[in-house]
Image (spheres, coloured by chain):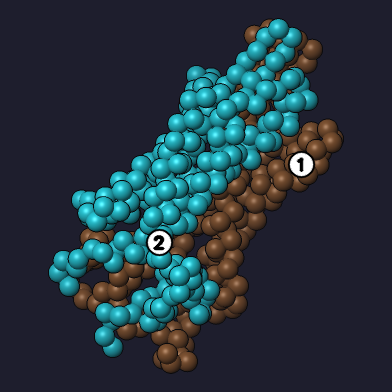
Chain colours: A cyan, B brown
Amino acid sequence: MSHEHLIACHECDLLLRPPELEPGGVARCPRCGATLYKSAHRSQERALAFTVSAIILLMLANFFPIMALQVGGNQVSCTLTSAALMLYHEGMQELGILVLITTVIVPTAQMLIMLYVLLPLSLDYLPPRIPDMLRMLNMLRPWSMVEVFMLGILVSLTKLTAMATVIPGIALWSFAALMVLMTAAISAFNARHIWQLLPLENA
Amino acid sequence: MTPRAVSAADEGLLNCHSCGLLSKNVPNAHDRCPRCGAHLHLRKPDSLARTWALLIAAFLLYIPANILPVMHTASIIYEEDDTIMSGVVYLWTSGSWPLAILVFCASVTVPLAKLIALSVLAWTAQHKSTWRQQERTRLYRLVEFVGRWSMLDIFVVTLMVGLVHFQSLATISAGPGAVAFAAVVVLTMFAAMSFDPRLIWDPEQKQDD
């Protein structure tokens, strides 16, 4: 059997002929139901637009306070980084680093890699080291936890309102929007389409 | 397509885990993908051994994660240690029961269900079971998807520590349970990544031949 026109399901290894998709369509494995790939129709344009807006919101979300707490005459506000650093200085280095990785470093890296790949592609130019970039993107994906952090903000908001007056900050709204934009950017991003642009070196 | 399921491995083909290109499985050839240069493997290397090792470590840490306090509150009036469970109880009694249920699911149910589910997956794959393959694949997908949500409590503790530090009035600090709990989440995520779902389907191929 010639294998040039075949693919294998990454979850059950079923050998199959890749079906043609309509715009917006999704190909699923007939045996195990895994999502094989999505239609590439205008996907990179959408992904680029979402990525650029997500990068702007990432800056707002990281440099502005998430919320402030008011007790009597005292007011304390915190940004994501200042909260993680507080853990770090209290001797909980591992926790502080884990929080920074999952909420700041990985999401930022994801968006910058996507910008690096998508911006030149939109100008019909293939940037160098694409395989490394796509591999890194795959590896980073499970460790990006902006949406979980957003839920964490809501839970702590509820707990804190019982103790004192809470004033929501700019970063709180930025995180809510960032959560939506990053999900949209990552789901629009079509890695299969980009892989297909690459030449075979020694096949 | 023929009704009989043929896997890539049956045809001597390797699926690149990185870019999805199929290559011929030629022994002694360069084991790198001709398109993206990733190392090629028929299945994830040492998948079951790695999954078990990470799972056992996670099971052991699950105990201190639930017994030790994750958060310590000190104020002029009282001092309090909170475990994962007492945090849920607090949310429940203070009237925000939707959040209590949510935190209970993310912090108590999900980690335990994940440990059990991954053990079942690894055990059945090890015994080359053909039992409910489709459901087991779906279970694997679910485990991969929900695992990250257990970080919720860690983020809550981080924000509470970051905000509540009014020198003499009240201060919140993180407890040792939080480190154990975060370790359980990270270890089970690695365990899910080490498990190769294709092992669920491999026994079927052998029987067909």
Q: Is residue B176 left or right of residue A161?
A: left
Where does the N terminus of chain B fall, quadrant-wise?
Answer: bottom left
Q: Nearer the viewer, mark 1 or mark 2?
A: 2
Query: Mark 2 packing: few (<14 Cα in 10 Å), some, or many (20+)?
Result: few
The reply to whether the C-beta atoms of the residues labelled 1 and 2 are less than 8 Å apart is no
- From the viewer's side, name the closer residue of A200 and A170: A170
User: Where is residue B154 drawn, in percent x and y?
Assistant: 59, 35
User: Where is residue A166 drawn, in percent x and y?
Assistant: 70, 23
What residue appears at the point 44 percent right and 67 percent down from the top-left corner? A38
The chain ID associated with circle 1 is B
Under mark 2, the amino acid is: Arg
- In the picture, the disc for residue A147 is none
What residue appears at the point 49 percent right and 74 percent down from the top-left corner? A28
Where does the C terminus of chain B fall, quadrant-wise?
Answer: bottom left
User: Where is residue B169 drawn, in percent x and y?
Assistant: 71, 10
* Residue named by callout 2: A42
Q: Is residue A85 left or right of residue B174?
A: left
Q: Secondary structure at mark 1?
A: helix
Judge whether B93 appears above or below A83 on screen: below
* Residue named by callout 1: B100
